[in-house]
Amino acid sequence: MAGVTGDGPSAGGVIRLAIVDDDPLVRAGLRILVGGSPEIEVVAEAGDGAEAVTVAQAHRLDVMLMDIRMPRVDGLAATRRIRSRPGAPQIIVLTTFDVDEYVLEALRGGAGGFLLKDTPPREILTAVRTVAAGAASLSPTVIRRLIDHVADPAAGTRRARSRQRLATLTERESEVALLVGEGRSNAEIGTHLGMSLPTVKGHVSRLLTKLDLNNRVQIALLVHDAELL
């Protein structure tokens, strides 16, 4: 795993974005959308997952908008490859939720969130800013819906393994992990546990390192896999 990367936007506060989609019209539409936001700059595009991996290596990026269904290398494989490397950009998966059963796999592969392709423009920009800042663009309701949506015959095995991994945590780390699993923000966790924001951030960072995860979405998925919520 790549570990913690959430250093935030590049110098100057501009979020450097890459758009990955096999449909040129979708890429053009997203580029036009982002063009109206002075703090987000589209620095690269790719038409499939193989190109996305190359783009991630060639450019200093903060966020990638990643389609799932693409030729050659799909967005799932590309997300895993990109997020496994140090200094990897955050990734937001683009999907059509009602027909796509692979979102959960993308999140386990290191994606920081997902957007439906019919998401209102303002919400797309908000998601990019949120993920660039190192937070997850994923609500607890969405996590539960994703888990319910995907039938998984390996659930029993994953539950046992997840509980085994979480058993290595201290009592306080376990409390923080459960609250992350509920979709709580760092500020909400701090209020609930009576801790300062820097202390909460420190606990989350240690969780990522100790559990060998990329981001807080994966913490939430681990908690749900363990069926602790």
Image (cartoon, rainbow, N blue to C red):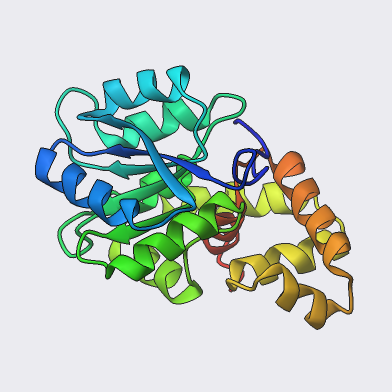
Percent from the top left, x then y, of residue 17? 42, 41
Residue in the image at 76% along x and 66% along y: 176
| Residue 28 picture quarter | top left
Front-most of residues 36 and 171? 36
Percent from the top left, x then y, of residue 134? 61, 52
- In the image: residue 95, left or right of residue 109: left
Front-most of residues 150 and 80? 80
Looking at the image, can residue 50 be seen?
A: yes
Percent from the top left, x then y, of residue 38? 45, 54
Q: Report the quarter where the N terminus lies.
A: top right
Residue in the image at 22% along x and 29% along y: 48
Residue in the image at 64% along x and 73% along y: 184
Residue in the image at 58% along x and 71% along y: 183
| Residue 199 picture quarter | bottom right
**Above or below 10: residue 197:** below
Percent from the top left, x then y, of residue 120? 27, 70
- How many circles with numbers are drawn on the protein? 0
Q: Report the quarter where the C terminus lies.
A: bottom right
**Above or below 57: residue 52:** below
Front-most of residues 146 and 62? 62
